[in-house]
Image: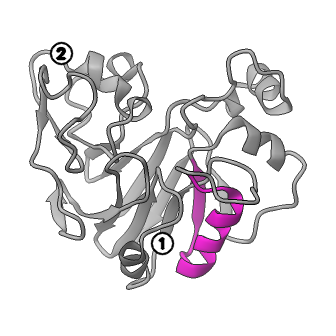
Amino acid sequence: MNLELEFLGTADARRVPVYGCRCRACERARNDPRYVRRPCSALIRAEGYQMMLDAGRTDLCETFAPGTIQSVLVTHYHMDHVMGLFHLRWGAGHTLPVHGPDDPDGCDDLYKHPGILQFQPPLAPFVPTDIGPFTVTPLPLNHSKPTLGYGIEYRGIRLAYLTDTVGLPDPTTAWLQQSPLALMVLDCSVPPKPNPPRNHNDLNLALALVEQIRPEKTLLTHLGHQLDDYLMSAPELPDGVEVAFDGRVVELRR
């Protein structure tokens, strides 16, 4: 049995191209749609079940037919990760379970007016939960709002989805080191900095985490245009580390 992860979006909150920016990366994205980055999110599927990781894209109603997404797993309630839910909630004919961290504030009025969204009890850190065919383990991250990454297991395949974060809390690192990871999807928003940014990994910190956790493969996501521009002239990334792009599908085999 196989598991697939599809990147629906790989950008930071600014997206790529950035409005009005004329850097090399933004100009490249304007001229070649392969380099466009939309709000950071992904889709994971197995056995006909599709679970969305974050819902920042605003075209969800046009892109996914009713009933084709069985659940949504939210990392946190910043607008660029849940914008798509604001329109989706006014749908009809079915309900959509939404799982996420313990954040009483949520985002704007999503809790007050959920529509077809069924917000589930908050996920508890390090407590595995079965969602469809997947076993999901919430992993605390370092961010300005309550945020969870997720360890996802399916028939012996183990991956981690870790955005938004700057570094990792020690207990999360320890959990990730317990068993081999086939894939780690990791926040890496900006080029190398003298000091780590406040809310997101720079490239130095991301690569240090890769060295510490040693997954079989790492895909960097939540990229900003400055990092794209930097990578156009930078040396190649280490073996096993790649940059994710919108639309990429990764198939993991048992």
Among numbered discs 2 and 1, the one appearing first in the sequence = 2
State the mark number for residue 131.
none
166 in the magenta segment: no
Q: Is residue 236 left or right of residue 116?
A: right
Q: Quadrant of the N terminus?
A: bottom left
Q: Secondary structure at mark 1?
A: loop
Residue at the bottom extreme?
Answer: 178
Q: Secondary structure at mark 2?
A: loop
Q: Determine the residue positioned at 32% across, 37% down.
A: 77
Position of residue 74 measured from the top left corner of the image (x, y, whole percent):
30, 44
Q: Is residue 87 left or right of residue 25?
A: left
Position of residue 100 measured from the top left corner of the image (x, y, whole percent):
23, 47
Q: Relative to 50, does residue 90 appear above or below in the rendering?
A: above
Q: Amino acid at mark 2?
A: Gly
Q: Which residues are magenta?
A: 200-221
Q: Quadrant of residue 120?
A: top left
Q: Amino acid at mark 1?
A: Ala
Q: Quadrant of the C terminus?
A: bottom left
